[in-house]
Image (cartoon, helix red, strand yellow):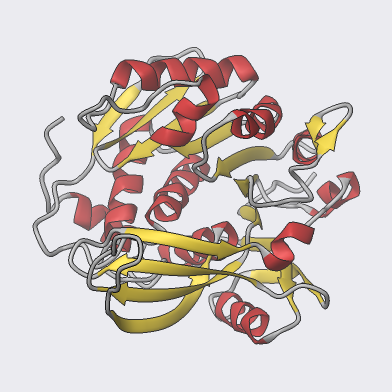
Amino acid sequence: MTEKKGIALAGTTLVDIVKMIDSYPEKGMLTGIGEIRRAVGGCVPNVGIDLAVIDPSLPVAAYGTIGADDNGEFLLKELSSRGINVSGLTLDAQEPTGFTDVMTVAGTGERTFFTKAGANARFAPDEAFASTINEKIFHIGYILLMDALDEEDPVYGTRLARLLHAVQERGILTSIDVVSRVGDRFREKMTPALRYSDYAIVNEIEACGVAGLSARDENGKLILENLEKAMDAMFACGVRRAVIIHCPELGMIRRKGEKTTVQPSLDLPKGFIKGSVGAGDAFCAGCLYGLLRGYDDKHLLTFASSAAACNFTAPDAVSGMRSCAEIEQLASEYPLRKL
């Protein structure tokens, strides 16, 4: 059997309309819009292009559903120009390509999202789809934004869980990501997918959402004990290999049966951050690359954090990414944050 190589990315495929604003207004008030740009967005384009920039020799394949429209053509052009295999992106004539209006505060990089799922809601690969995957790692996101795959399944819990099981049966490592929402629906859709995931790469809110815990106290400080409990909960749900949590202050990883490694984020100077759209995806790309290359835990977290820092240098989701060597160099240029 031929050794599997590369990374397959599936799920949410969007266009971001990034609008730089002066400030986020109170309800009923007005704020000014400065620069407007169209960019790729969503799990598949963001992580895919990040990986292609990190290592142009890495095989990357994209799977999802986009509209038969101008935004769909834009995505196909952007991805294929980076050497990403787009044969797994299917066109839907009934729904538009999904899009997100990204309101980014110019002075801080903080952002707020207004999204329409569009064709993403119709991405519905069945078990036979698994036989088309030839990469070593299959990463899919985002749970709660893929309506068809979030549907209930009588055996596996959700259709996504059924798909992940089929992919695992082919000896392919599975990885998941989710959007930050609270409530019972989050746990309802997340838990079945965890059962058939080798890796879960999530932020602090999403991790604690699985366990019904708060990630931060009333002052906004991280509750590290709750993050550890959240890792316990995800392993109890069935994660096979590793749970990785990221947040502005730090990254942390625990491999099954081992101790947790915590690595502070880079302490970046004032004015460094031009935007934070796609920062989580950039961190995820760094993690997937480190997992594929066999990085040890500290190296993996440092690399992923530095990849996210590269992302901060541009207002859209992918323009700030740099090569593997440049990411490693950035990690050595700034001190770590004090926790």
Say above or below: 96 vs 142.
below
Say above or below: 320 vs 307.
below
Asked whether, in this view, residue 105 is left or right of residue 178, the answer is left
Q: Is residue 55 visible?
A: no
Residue at 30% across / 68% down in the picture?
29
Q: Is residue 248 visible?
A: yes
Say above or below: 178 vs 6.
above
Residue 32, position as x, y percentages in the image: 27, 79
Asked whether, in this view, residue 174 is left or right of residue 15, the answer is right
Q: Nearer the viewer, residue 163 or 71?
A: 71
Residue 139, position as x, y percentages in the image: 62, 47
Q: Nearer the viewer, residue 237 or 210?
A: 210
Asked whether, in this view, residue 99 is left or right of residue 322, the answer is right
Q: Quadrant of residue 208?
A: top left
Q: Quadrant of residue 102?
A: bottom left
Residue at 37% across / 38% down in the picture?
246
Q: Nearer the viewer, residue 309 or 109?
A: 109
Residue 247, position as x, y percentages in the image: 33, 39
Say above or below: 155 vs 324.
above
Q: Which quadrant would the N terminus be assigned to in this image? A: top right
How many numbered marks appear? 0
Q: Nearer the viewer, residue 3 or 193?
A: 193
Residue at 19% across / 46% down in the picture?
266
**Residue at the extreme front of the image, as rendered:** 28
Residue 125, position as x, y percentages in the image: 83, 53
Q: Quadrant of residue 81?
A: bottom right
Q: Which quadrant would the C terminus be assigned to in this image? A: top left
**Residue at the extreme bottom of the image, as rendered:** 70
Residue at 52% across / 66% down in the picture?
41
